[in-house]
Image (cartoon, coloured by chain):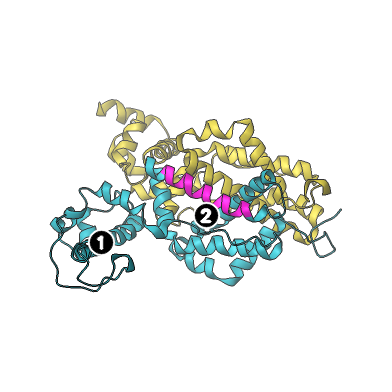
Chain colours: A yellow, B cyan
Amino acid sequence: MAQPARNRERLGSGAITRALIVRAATELFARDGYEATTVKAIAERCNITDPALYYHFRSKREILDAIWTCVPADMVPVLHESSLSQDELADDIEERFYAWARSWAHLRILLEQVLSGDTCATGFRQGLLDRFRAGTLPSAQALYGEAGELVLDTVFHAVCGLLYDTVLQHGDEFREVVNQDSYRRRLRRIIKQALPCQPPDSQR
Amino acid sequence: MPASRQPAVTPARPETGAGAADPRAGAGAAKRGGDATRTRILEAAHELFATRGFDGTTVKDIGAKAGLTDAALYYHFRSKREILDAVWQIPESRMLGDVPSGEAMGPEVLEHLVDVMFDGAVARDGFLRLMARQVLARDRTAMALRSQTMTVWRQYMARHFETAFSAEESAAMADSLAMLIHGIYMNTQIDHGSGTADVIRDPAFRDRAKAMARTMFPLGRACTAEGPCEQ
């Protein structure tokens, strides 16, 4: 059993193995929790030996830290060239939400770590906000002037709140729930509530 | 638990009546002794579960923190799980009290709501984090309790909106406000960890949170040059 694994390890490049380890760990941490997951279990999932894993990461903690620096491609949003109308901005934010929601595993791990007092995910969260702002601020400033940044912060927190609440409320059914029409309408409503100057007849 | 005969003790609780003539005074005293120990156990457990998690805490840890032997602890609870189930029942874990009488919804009431929510979050930080951790661990009791807590929270806010809006609109607005506050709170937790409570108490933090709430709910203030309106 060990022989074939070592052969496989030699064939792949270091970077590929690292990425496989991080991906396997992400799946296990999300499913079973960080504390309950062993390095052995991660190694088994990648089909490598423990020593082979330790070659890349000195500890379970190091793997966790690496997870935050490996942002999945679909969490990186598109930057717009021209500024958006209010409706287009709402659409854009909705799409970002669904991009974030695809990384359900990262969100679960993030919440678990945060709730045990670990601030390891701060950089990750700041990265989310930075990319969010970079993509939406020009439009927000064109629409709302100086208040653009406040508006975006409001929308960001409201949308994050919904995201975290859904992970907590629905756990393993997260994916099914966020794809329901009623959920999409709820998200849309929250986004529009946070973007000011809705048509006068929608607010008394 | 047998009621032991105690020397006459003035009851602490008015409902047990006055003095040794009351046949329940003896039983009351023994029960209060038991209750006090039970409470000590639950408080110790609450704090340990919140900081170390349910799995990370042993019954021995709880006993040590409460100043009890294992045997004394097991007299009250048969298992760690039983202790957790009792922690959920602690009265101060109920989030909110009665809705204050219907002052019409407006910017001041909105800001007051923001304060109430964050004050509540700070006061119950340990409990809320424990509940959320257990939810992630797929603990069914915690999931039901969280669901109930969120509902109570939303209804509390909705009742304020109902002084100015329909029931349906109020429910939707309360939901949006709840998600805003939840997001601010969780993002603060992500950044500050155990320092969150101090950050949330800071007036500058509250002012920012209120500014965001007002962005969401302009309420009665017409869009003027000072607001973000362009229309």
The crowding category of the residue bearing disc 2, from other C-alpha atoms within 10 Å (few below 14, some 14 to 19, many at least 20), is many
Using the image, tell me which numbered label, if any, was put on residue B186.
Answer: 2
Mark 1 lies on residue: B35
Q: Which residue corresponds to the image point at 24% horizontal and 58% vertical from the top-left?
A: B62
Q: Which residues are magenta?
A: B143-159
Q: Nearer the viewer, residue B154 or A183?
A: B154
Q: Measured from the top left, where is residue A60 in percent x and y?
A: 34, 47
Q: Label 1 to label 2, Cα distance in Å?
A: 35 Å
Q: Position of residue B200 (x, y in %)?
A: 53, 66
The chain letter under disc 1 is: B
Quadrant that contains the N terminus of chain A: top left
Q: Is residue A117 visible?
A: no
In the image: residue B66, left or right of residue A161 = left
**N-terminal-most mark, 1 or 2:** 1
A152 with respect to A41 (left or right):
right
Q: Position of residue A19 (x, y in %)?
A: 45, 38
Position of B197 with respect to A60 (left or right) is right
